[in-house]
Structure formats: C-alpha cells, structure tokens
Amino acid sequence: MRTVFSIPLVVAASVFLFLAAPGRAGAQTDCLACHSDAGIQDASGHSVGVDAPKFHSSIHGSLQCGDCHAAIKEYPHPDKVTPVQCETCHADEAAGLVGSVHASRAEHPCTSCHGDAHSIFPKSDPKSAVYPLNVPRTCGNCHGNGEMAKKHGLNNVYPLYLDSIHGFALSKEGLLVAANCQSCHGSHHILSHKDPASPTYKASVPKTCGNCHAGITADYMGGVHGKAVLAGKLDAPVCSDCHTAHAIEQPTASAFRMQSTPICGNCHKDKFSTYRDTFHSQLGSLGGYVETARCWDCHGAHEILPASDPRSPINKANLVQTCGRCHAGANLSFVQYQPHANARNRKLNPALYFIRLFMNLLLASVLSFFMIHTILWLIRSRYDQVKRRKAEGGKNA
Amino acid sequence: MPDMEQAAVASGEPAGAQERYFVRFTRAQRYMHAVLFTTFLGLAATGLPMRFSQSAWARRFASGVGGFGAIIFFHKLFAVILTLAFLIHVREIFQRALVRREKGIFWGPTSMVGNWKDVKDLFGHLRWMVGLGPKPQFERYAYWEKFDYWAVFWGMVVIGFSGYAMWFAPFFARFLPGWALNAVLVIHSEEGLLAILFIFSIHFVNTHLRPDSFPMDLVIFTGVESEEEFKTKRPMEYQRIASEGKLETRISHAPALWLTNFSKVVGTIAILIGLTLLVLTLSAYFGS
C-alpha cells in the first residue's frame, strides 16, 4: 500500500500554510472565529461582534476583513487599532466631504449616515440607511434632535419636513421621487445655504427645485420674481420664500390659502395694507373661508407679470376674464373696481377719500352730540331721582 | 291710530288692581321692534367680525360658528328678513298715506316727521339738563325718538343698498361705475359701525338704561304703560287725548306676569349682547 502523504510533504505543506498565514491575516473565517460572538467587546467595552450572515449579504460581504482593517496584520492583534479609512476605496466621496458642513471625520464618521459598517447596503436597497425612503430618518437621527439643532444654530426642521407635502409623499405614499433631504441638500458635499455654491443658496433654489418641478420653474423664471433673481436681485422671492423650505404645504389646500397673503405682504406692504381694507381680505381672514381672492388668484403665482404686459391676468384687456373666474357676469364696469383702493389717499382715490371722510364726520358728529346729550341727561335724571327719593324719605339709590 | 283702539279692546288680560294702563304700541309695532332688534343683533354679531377681521375675537367667533361661510350666510339671512320687515313698514306707510289718507302720518302730534316743536324741545331739554329751564312737555314721539326712527330708516336704506350692491356686485355694475363698488364697502361698514355704536350706547341709555326707565323700558314689549308713567313721560300726549275725551279708548290692562317676565328676559339678553358687541367693537376700533 502506498502512503498518500509522505512525511516531508506534510511538513512542507504545514510550513507553507504557516508562512502564508500572515499574508492571509483578516480572512473572514479566521476573524469570525472570535468576532462572530455577538457579546465580544474591546478593552473600552464597545461591541466588536460582527453579524456574519448580515455582513455576507451586505455590499462589502465579499471583502476580506483585512481589506478595510488594514492595520491588523497578525493574530493576536493589538487592543487598539487605527480606524478604518473608507477613502482608501471611496476617494470621490471623501473628496466631497472636504469643506462640507459634515467635514469633521470625528463628529461625522461615514457610519453616522451609512449605518453599521458591517451592514452597508447599496442606496437602491430598501435596507440601506441612504435608500430614498430612509434618508429622512437617517438625517433625523441627528437633525430631529432639538438640542442638536439648537447647539448648531439650526432650525429644527425635521418635524416640519415630515408634515410637509414632500414628507407625506415619502412616508405615507412611499414615493421614491418625493424630495428627501439629499434631493435638495446633496449628500457628501453639503454646504450651508449661505454658501453661493450650495444648491440651497437663495439664487440656486429655483434650479434645485426645478430638478423636479421643471415646468413651474420655467414659469417662475419668466415672471418678475424669477427675472429679478436672475439679475442678482436677491430681495426677490425664490420658491422657498413663499412655500417655505421644509414645511411645504399643498398650495391649493385651505390651510395654505388661509395663511398665504401675509407671505406676499412681507414685501408688498402697501398692497397688503390696501388689500386688507377690502372685502376679499375681510372675508378671507376668518376661519375656513378660502374662496375669496388671494394675491395669486389675480396676479398669478409663478409667472407673475406686470399689469402692462398683455399676457398678465391683471392687464386691462384680461380683467373681465380674470375677475369673471369668481364673479360670474363681471363686465367692463365691474372690473373698474379697485382691489387695492386706498380710501386714505386723496390723490389716488378722491371719490373714496371724500366718501370715507363724510362717513367719518357723520359718525363722529352724531356720536359726539348724542354722547354729550346723553351724559347731561343721565346726570340730570339721577339728580332729580335722588332729590325725589329724599323728599319721599327713602334711600338715595 | 285706529289700531290702538282695537288693541285696547282685544286685550283680555285681567285688570290691574289700582293703576290704569294705557296702550302705547300696537301688537304689529311690537312685533316690528322684535324683528328689528333680533335681526339687528344678528347683523351686528355677524358683521363686526367681518369689519374687524384681524381681531382675535373675530377669528375665534368665526371659527366657532362654522367659519366664514356660516357668518356670511347668517348675515345675508338676517339682511333679507330685515329687508322684508322694512318693505312691510314702507307698504304700511303708503297704505296709511295714500289709501286711508291719514293726514296725521306726515304732520301733527302723532307723526314721526320732525317739526318746529322738536327743535324747541331739543334746546329746551338741553337747557333743562343744565338747570336753566323747565322740562319740555313731550308729545307722542320725542325728538330723540324721531331721530332714532329716521336714523334707522336712513341706515336701512344706505346699509341695505350698499349691502345688496356687494352681494350682487356684477348686477349692480351694469348701472353703477366701478369705483362705486369700492365705495359701497366703505359706506356699508362705516354706516354699520355708526348704527351699532349708536344703538348699543345712545339708544340703550336714552330708552332703557337711564334712571327713569332703568333697567329697561318694557313698553315696547308689553305695549302698555301705567298712567303715571304715561303722564310723566308724555304729558302733552296724555293731555291731548284727555282733552279730546279719548282716554277711555286707550285704556288697557296691566301686562300679564308672564309677558312682563318674558320681556325682561328677552330685553336683558338683547341689551347684554349689545353691550358685549359694543365693548368688542370699541376694543377692536381703538386696539387696531
């Protein structure tokens, strides 16, 4: 019978395996011999266990441990090892982080967004922390924390987003196209909205929103506000000035209609004040009555054009049609109504000014005369009453 | 007033023990006042939130009654009822003037139309208030009551017309210039404000809250007043009727207890609502 293994061959194989071992340090099987124990901890008490099946299914599952934990060359390895450097492979993402608001690696390690290092999934995978439907929750881990927001001088926008039309579309409808945090802010190279390079910088907002809302943005860019912003006049409103950035509501819903006119009024103060004097505003200010005209019902919302523009809904030639949308039967005389008449301005609205003056004088004179008349009468009647009761021997009052 | 005699005869209530009671207002007149003050309170309560739509109380009230749709609905409803009452009143005037040819409706002691005596009474009354003369002897309607009547009459025409012009703006625009549509809101709200301030302060005090009538003059509810009250408040009317020998035709009975109590409750509620609205109006007017 021939021996299958000669002694020298066994020795040679053992030596080969032994010598080869350092080069293969970090092979999954070797490391998992210890690290698959979920309870295993390092000297400072942090868990260093790895969920092997989960890791195998993750995007890095085919890598060897040593590919990332490159500092570990042999077993036993030191208690303290240098942290994993993701940028070894992910150089573009690391470059993006430079200069961003999350640039500090100590404060914002990759895992703070991508989750547990051993269960990272591609962003198209619903298990991924950066899967579109999971992004708000991932960002909310920090940004949903009021204390954290306060510390960094940020508005606590996470709850606002969740209740917004985008948040609802994402969380209730599961729409992958619904804007999540990174749709507007980007992912690795997130910049402050004060930074002109940021997609949330005021002048860039229309383009950012236009990534999805292309039609509206085109309308907006054709209107007075869009043209002003394009010309560098950043006092003009961009999308977020009217719709807000995070608490965006369905603009046709009554909640938005009820609160919306003051938004335009923030800048158009004189127009807002004269609007408030009108029936449109008086009716529209109170709970639940949403039908009366708001600013954009007449002026348009996105492609706002000056009255001189023949395409403007408030151009003289279009008024019958514009007013007629609510007021059936509106005619040329009807549309002479001034929705921003100022009864306090004699030059602009003389007829209205004098009518108001007359009414006020009437009110003041009638009331003052009868006020004096009544007070004198009261005093005299009381005087007589007291005198009479005294004479009758009763009490005074 | 022929109705007075009928009312006196028709009243079947038990007679008062000692005092005699005289009819002052017919049933129709009392109903007219009731319709007038309930719709007026309703119009004021629903109109003021619109006038002061920026006030917190206006918004709370609006949402409390079901939003602005409800407010405008009730405002229009009360307006239509009041308009009907106004038209019925105008029809009655025409009937009495043209059909029954009552001359007294436009002149004479029982007319609502002002006359020279009213001017003298006004100055005489003012002189009496400051202690410079005797108290004037008032007829059936004193000058301030005529003013109340004409203020309401003019107010209903002005407020009513401007209100309907807003309600049916496209229709009115067929024969009104465009700026008139701006003017009607100013007129409507200022005249409404005047009416509210006047009724809830001047009318309330002159007619109900002054010491001679405090806390309220029930005659507009019960229709009758005691002989003593009649004599003191309207001495000339009393003397005139007495000299004509017609006192008997006006004699009625003391109002039934239920009617007095009912009138007190309704009157108190109306006055309290009015005073509340007055305070809200003043706070909104001077607060804004």
Image (cartoon, coloured by chain):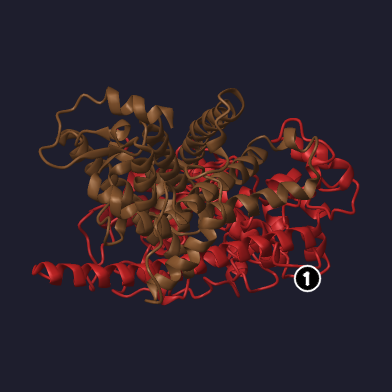
* Rendered image quadrant of residue B33: top left
Q: Name the residue: 69% across, 45% down.
A: A297
Left/right placement of residue A125 relative to residue A55 reads: right
Q: Name the residue: 23% across, 50% down.
A: B228
Q: Quadrant of the C terminus of chain A?
A: bottom left
* Rendered image quadrant of residue A208: bottom right
The image position of residue B32, as x and y in percent, is 42, 34
Element type at marker 1?
A: loop
Is residue B83 something one can see in this rendering? yes
The image position of residue A396, as x and y in percent, is 14, 71
Is residue A156 something one can see in this rendering? no
Name the kind of residue labelled 1 in the image. Answer: Lys
* Rendered image quadrant of residue B103: top right
The image position of residue B192, as x and y in percent, is 54, 51
Q: What residue is shown with label 1?
A: A233
Q: What shade has chain B been given?
A: brown
Q: What shade has chain A been given?
A: red
Q: Between A53 and B185, which is closer to the camera in this rendering?
A: B185
Q: Name the residue: 32% across, 75% down.
A: A80
The image position of residue B110, as x and y in percent, is 47, 42
